[in-house]
Amino acid sequence: MAPPNDPSSLPLRICKPESLDKYFELLDGKFSVKGFPLLSEVPSNVVFAPFLSIYKSSDAPLALLQRVQALSHKGGFLGFHKEAPSDRLMNSIGKFTGREFLSIFRFKTWWSTMWMGSSGSDLQMETQWVLLNVPEIRSYVIIIPVIDGRFRSAFHPGTDGHVMICAESGSTKVTASSFDAIAYVHVSENPYNIMKEAFSALRVHLNTFKLLEEKTVPSLVDKFGWCTWDAFYLAVEPAGIWHGVNDFVEGGVSPRFLIIDDGWQSINTDDENPNEDAKNLVLGGTQMTARLHRLDECDKFRKYKGGSMLGPNPTSFDPKKPKMLILKAIEIEHAENDRDKAIQSRVTDLSPFETKIQKLKQELDVIFGGEEKSVSSGSSGSRSCKAESYGMKAFTRDLRTKFKGLDDIYVWHALCGAWGGVRPDSTNLNSKIISCKLSPGLDGTMADLAVSLEYVSEDYGGRVELAKGYYKGLSDSLSKNFKGSGLISSMQQCNDFFFLGTKQISMGRDPNGDPMGVYWLQGVHMIHCAYNSMWIGQIIKPDWDMFQSDHLCAKFHAGSRAICGGPVYVSDSVGGHDFELLKKLVYPDGTIPKCQDFALPTRDCLFSNPLFDKKTILKIWNFNKYGGVIGAFNCQGAGWDPKEQRIKGYSECYKPLSVSVHVTDIEWDQKKEAAQMGEADEFIVYLNQAEELLIVSPESDAVQITIQPSTFEIFSFVPIKKLGGTGISFAPVGLANMFNSGGTIQEVEYFDSEAETCVKIEVKGGGSFLSYSNASPKKGFLNGAEAAFEWLDNGKLALNLPWTETAGGVSNVAFLF
């Protein structure tokens, strides 16, 4: 974490350099970059100002300020001026046609995804940024709508190629007519540098958020975990959680973190007893209108008695019960939909529908075990959540007592309390904002609906001011209660959140999609994650979300999680696991062989459509400590339809495709430690799924393979080390039985002398350790003892490693030549 500035000093100021190249010019209706027109027909009310003419002061660290200063000539701001003030203003910033672009737009309130095209009219509503390819100067230009005063902005498509910017306050009481810095423009020769440079400049300019490099990420980022959502939905309860965690431990992959998702809070609807929890909720959606009526856990958790699961006869749990509840709840949902359709069709006798619904609800009650008497929060029989022997605190204490490796327990929370907020007439809550304390026994929270404030901002100073207030409270609570970083933001993919809510938050879910849904939607999820990471990753650590290990496309998801650079977690049902698959991702101790950065799309994917163009395979790149990695995923088959304004299937695209993978697809210069590796003369590349080992160089042809729909290949590239005058060429690949083979290598040392040549490698994990060697070693050693190895003529050198718990799973391997 970067050290803070000296609080006793005034905010640091950037000194204006005396002479710098002029990159941008707005003249006679043309906005140009290095003399080449970028936008034409720019209205006369649009203005451009260099970065330094707008910048005032910043609380950013000195190193960041100096970095931004050095590149300040490459960026500036667009503004516009109107005669009449309004709370929502729309204005063209000019037009472009015939130019490739990549963009991110909001297709739901809280989720965004990629879109590409060649004209301003191809943009989608609520575009958060647009990256333009400018091959005339071998560069890229990004334009980012930003916050200006009390207004936020986004791009919308215009007619005839025009780009429209929409500035809005979210309140009719907050109006303006003039903006000097409503969008930021930046140019760079590198599409990955441009994201770092542009968002660094905005961090310095706005002072309302911090970059990821300034913050500490939650410790769970390096670990394996379990989220309860798809296992139970709203029917989550202590016994199910207990048996679920135990399943993983007995299966050989111990979760190091647990997320208790929606279903643990005390909620009810406005037509219910204000002191009682809503009963027998199952499916997501049924709780959307419910509000918090109590700040502590709901009755099924409040009633948990400490120690009850630790004895010789713990509470039993039927793993079939959640699925039975879910199926019955779906029946009820369908029956209610049929009734609603009948109402719309003006059917007068609804009694058959109501009778069926009541019958199904009674059957649901039976599955739940009968309707239990609720414990009122205001009654004398209620248990206080502060009592040591009952409730969430007792439950989490018992979990930690039984499962020693369980480091973190998070719970789900909506930003406004529950989906419907806080119930105003609740017995125990005043209808005003009150400070909240840390729930006992918890390490963090997962916050949903992080951008819902825009709908309720009319009477609270507008969306920007309301968001600042909420996010300040959230950040203060995070600092005080959750070690400064114990929060996973979710449903937050809007620039309001990233520009206003991330001074403290350092990790967030990347996706929208359906990792547990129909097969053709699986690629959509990965596309969301990969492309959103380009901007999200500058501010928070991207989290690629959970999946279910027994799903039809589980392996497809597992491959992407292995190299995404974030945590790995699943939402398996109790008893529904593929442990063989999970063991390709997770060590027995619950840690993971994680890549060193967050995965990003390769250059040849930036302006293509890996979802339904019938030709593009998604390729993502990342780094390990001693090599680089590329994942190639066939995501074709579904995507956004601009006409229907929804994500739909494109079955004609769901077919095998060929892909070319080259060592230069990895952006070696993006990490200082990796730059030297990228300069190697030769590399070994290991194809994880094909189990092939190939020698390649920067000058050699790309590796060509065909990938079936919803499948993948992972390419691990490792520089070949040539050892002195012995003629030995060597490269450590890693554990071949793990998806991210290279991530298993902890340390490598080479000893080369006239007497002997030796390679020493520290490897974490058990299984088949693979290396490349052009000659067979004289001897092999494992943890100091001579060990048998296998060497083949093609250079494959293999040695079987055990998992030794007392050594933390780390083996010391040595080869003597």
Image (cartoon, rainbow, N blue to C red):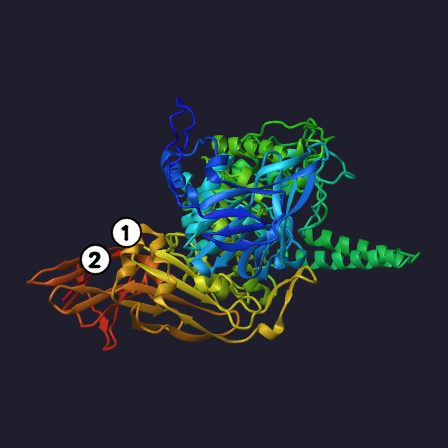
- Which image quarter holds the C terminus? bottom left
Amino acid under disc 1: Ala
How packed is label 1: few (under 14 Cα within 10 Å), some, or many (20 or more)? few
Residue most extreme to the left? 755
Q: Which residue is mark 1?
A: 807
Residue most extreme to the front? 28
| Left or right: 304, with 252 as reference point | right
Q: Which residue is mark 2?
A: 783
Query: Which residue corresponds to the image point at 54% horizontal and 59% vertical from the top-left?
Result: 101
Query: Which residue corresponds to the image point at 70% horizontal and 37% vertical from the top-left?
Result: 83
- Which image quarter holds the N terminus? top left
Q: Position of residue 264 (x, y in %)?
A: 61, 42
Q: Secondary structure at mark 1?
A: helix
Q: Position of residue 504 (x, y in %)?
A: 48, 36
CB of mark 1 within 8 Å of CB of mark 2? yes
Q: CA distance from mark 1 to mark 2?
A: 10 Å
